[in-house]
Each structure stands twice: as C-alpha cells, then as structure tokens.
Amino acid sequence: MQLRLTVLAFLFLASISLGQSPSVKPIAEDWDYVAPMKKVAAKFRGTDGVVIHVGGSMTIANPYGTWARSGKGKTRDDEAILKWMHTDKKDKTDGWWLCRTEIVSYRAHTSESGLKAAMLFAGGKRGLPTLEKILDETKPRIVAIECGIYDIEDGTPIDAYRKDMAKALDMILDRGSIPILNTIPPFKAQFEKTKQFNDVLRAIAKERGTPVLDLEREILTRRPNDWFGTLMKRIHLTASETGGSPSAEPTPENLRKSGYQLRGWLTVQKVAEIKRRVL
C-alpha cells in the first residue's frame, strides 16, 4: 500500500513538472452541446481562433483577462489554447484586448460598464456598438457573453430579458459562431431573482444546445455559504480584496479567493473544451 501511494505521488509531481497538472473541468451542462454546435460550426466563415468577450463591467474589468495574459501555473494545453486565441496580439483578433481596451471611459470594443440585454440591439449608452455590428466586424469563432446583473438591479422584466438573450444567442448562432453563455454570478441583494434569471439562461441555452459557463454554480459550489465578500462584492467579482490574485496559480484554494481569476480561468478551460469537442 505504501509503495502504491509513493508511486502515485511521484506520478502526480511528475505531471506537474511537465506542465500537465490534473485539470479541474468547468461544471458540465445538463445537455450535450457537441452535435448541435458542430452543425453551427460548419457554417463558420470568419477568422479561426478569434474569441470575443461581450459584456458589462465584469468583462471590461482588467482582472478578468489577467490570468489568460500573465497568470501563473499554465499547462502546455493552456498555452496552446491561448496561442490559438491570439492572446496578447493586441489587435482585433485578440478578444482579451478587445474587451479591456477602453475607447472612452468604461467602454471598450466589445464591452461597456452597465450593459443590459436590450443594449445588445440598441447599442450602449457610452457608444458600444450593437451586437450585430460587433459580430460583423470581428467574425468570431466563439463569443463569451455576460449580461444580466444590471437587468436584475434595474428591474428589467424577466420575459423581456428572456426575449433579448434568446435573440442574442440566435444572432451569434446564425453566423456560425459558438456562444458561451455566462450565468449571472450570485447577487446578494436579489439572490432569488438572480436564480430565476439564471434558470432562464439555462433554458434558452438548452433549447439551442449551446454551451454554458455556469458562473453562479461555480461560485456556489466552491463557497456555498461564504461566497459574498470572497468571490463577489455587491454586483462585481472580487480581484485581490480577500488575499487572492487574478494572476495566481489556479489551485483549488486560489480559485476560491478571486472571482475574476475564477471566471478568467474557467473561460480559458471552456474555450479549450469546445475546441477539443466541437472544432
């Protein structure tokens, strides 16, 4: 028994030294997206490897992309998928650059603070282009989309939110791009309403067979009772407020201490999963 444990420990340490540390996968959907997304991907006529990030303040925030750009503890697979994503090209093929580089205060190429679902079609208050224009200009292979926290805070009717987010998914799919729909992280002041909105997101994603990055479940699974103040602060993710760091090695413990690291790291893993399973 002791010999077996010693061998397992040796193999574990060897895998880490080779840049192949055991992976922690994003929480899986309750449906299989592979077949429907292969049909979608067959229509794609854009630029391979372009992965854009459309969203509000949790997307324009610099810490969201910190781990992807300069974080510690990357495996060879992480490095490969980040290269495929044109990370740090700092041009319109680099989605991390597009979502964080401000054109005017609080507004980048694909994100804007305060974004609500209806603005995906009307344009943002600070000049963010419509989703249609963003898609036409970037021709992305994959679109990570985060939108809803401001709809909850400002009292958007849930039926209107459902209609807008379904329309956004269909617009992405019609172009042969694959959406990664982010659920809304838990909002303490409107906790039950956040759950209802996220049920809507999961339902429209399941209807279309699209992938989901279930940020709500990821946070509550890691910290079911003390997520507020550790992974979330009011309506935003945490960066380094509670001893974590967006650039830290993505150990299970570190991923419980920085909400932005958790979302950024999970996004990279989800893109790699989709590339491996669909593309």
Image (tube, grey):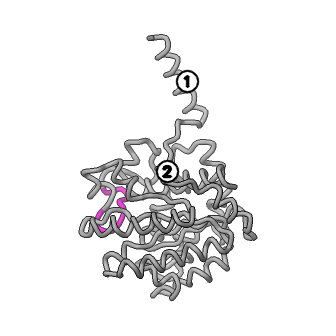
Secondary structure of the residue carrying numbered label 2? loop
Image height check: is 183 above or below 108? Answer: above
Q: Which mark is residue 28?
A: 2
Q: Give the residue type that dot 2 points to.
A: Ala
Quadrant that contains the N terminus: top left
Is 110 in the magenta? no
Q: Main secondary structure of the magenta part?
A: loop
**Left or right: 157 as drawn, with respect to 19:** left
How busy is the neighbourhood of tag 1: few (under 14 within 10 Å), some, or many (20 plus)? few
Look at the picture and state if 130 lies above or below 100.
Answer: below
Residue 14: image quadrant is top right
From the top left corner, tell me how far across and down residue 206 is, in percent.
Answer: 51, 62
Tell me which segment is drawn in magenta. Answer: 233-241
- Residue at 63 percent of width and 71 percent of height: 173
Secondary element at tag 1: helix
- Left or right, 253 with respect to 11, comes to left
Q: Position of residue 187 (x, y in %)?
A: 30, 66
Q: Which residue is mark 1?
A: 11
Which residue is nearer to you in this view: 250 or 188?
Answer: 188
Q: Earlier in the sequence, mark 2 or mark 1?
A: 1
**CA gap, disc 2 to disc 1?**
27 Å
